[in-house]
Amino acid sequence: KIDLNYTYHVNSNEETAKLISYDIYTKQDKNYKEVISEENSFDDIENIVDSMFNMSLYTHSILLNFKKRDEESLNILETLYRINLKENSIFCEKIKPQIRNRLINLTQKAKNSDLKLGLVYCSKYEYYFSEDEILLTYRPYVNFKLGQNKNKIEEDVNKATKRFKNSLAVMTNNAFINILNKKYKEAYEEYAKIIENRNSINFNVQDTLNFIYEEYNKTKDPNLLYGSGILSYYFGDKDIAIEDLKTFIKKVDRENSYRKMIAKANRIILKNNK
């Protein structure tokens, strides 16, 4: 049940109003051109009624989105998708970008509040976009934090690596997993690729750093601080990066860790030695 008893006030000259109008127009214009085929025919009338129904609900979904009611907006879009899928309507493809937008918003909210709900959104995401980069980088995080589906984590990470090998978000996931699995050579190589491609950043650095620090506080594995040090040095606070790398060198097991990680950390520290 969705409460549609609301008013959305906006000046027609505002940018938001223009965006809403344009979005609705692009969905509606082609739709009406396609439905009218024969004057006064019953099929035409039925098609126009269906089209008006689609556009009415679609308009509600857009307005609810601007009112930050993403869950309700998504419910409307999913209902429209199911109805039109039965009719093999091209309207389904038209609204999929909006479905993706809502799922991105909702998964981000769940990341900070309810990870189990995040998995529910992942299932929805998989239904519409089975091999989307956001799904394949977000779901491993959720499963890892919940301590479940280790095989699914590896499956998603491997699939993401094959499909989005140049994505920094994918590289960051790989580097983290490699450190946990004590594959330090592979972790070093992933961080080296991140450094090389650092101008094409596509992930939230602070969220990633917070995640690494949480795991470090639980496991006390100093190798994790190599990752936080590298990310902070190239994307964040260099002073924090130097402290992390110094702690990494001080606490790391030099016999079992990868020497190139230690060498890289030393070079950065020496370069910034005050």
Image (cartoon, helix red, strand yellow):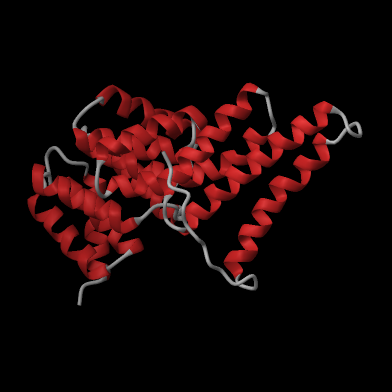
Question: Residue 61, how many percent across, how many down?
Answer: 53, 47
Q: Quadrant of residue 137?
A: top left
Question: In percent of the image, x 52 and y 33: which residue is there?
Answer: 79
Q: Is residue 177 visible?
A: no
Question: In percent of the image, x 59 and y 49: which residue is there?
Answer: 59
Q: Give 229 or 14, whichever is nearer the viewer.
A: 14
- The residue sitting at the right extreme is 39
Which quarter of the figure is the N terminus placed in? top left
Q: Give 194 or 111, whichever is nearer the viewer.
A: 111
Q: Against 65, is 128 above or below? A: above
In the rendered structure, the answer to whether residue 109 lies left or right of residue 246 reads right
Q: Quadrant of residue 237?
A: bottom left
Q: What is the number of callouts on the image?
A: 0
Question: Residue 265, how many percent across, how many down?
Answer: 23, 57
Question: Residue 155, how many percent across, how many down?
Answer: 36, 25
Q: Against 84, is 94 above or below? A: below
In the rendered structure, the answer to whether residue 226 lies left or right of residue 80 reads left
Q: Is residue 268 visible?
A: yes
Question: In percent of the image, x 53 and y 67: which residue is there?
Answer: 9
In the rendered structure, the answer to whether residue 235 lies left or right of residue 263 reads right
Q: Against 38, is 30 above or below? A: below
Question: Residue 274, how many percent across, how many down?
Answer: 20, 77
Question: In percent of the image, x 33 and y 41: which residue is there?
Answer: 173
Q: Give 20 or 193, whichever is nearer the viewer.
A: 20
In the rendered structure, the answer to whether residue 247 lies left or right of residue 101 reads left
Q: Give 177 or 4, whichever is nearer the viewer.
A: 4
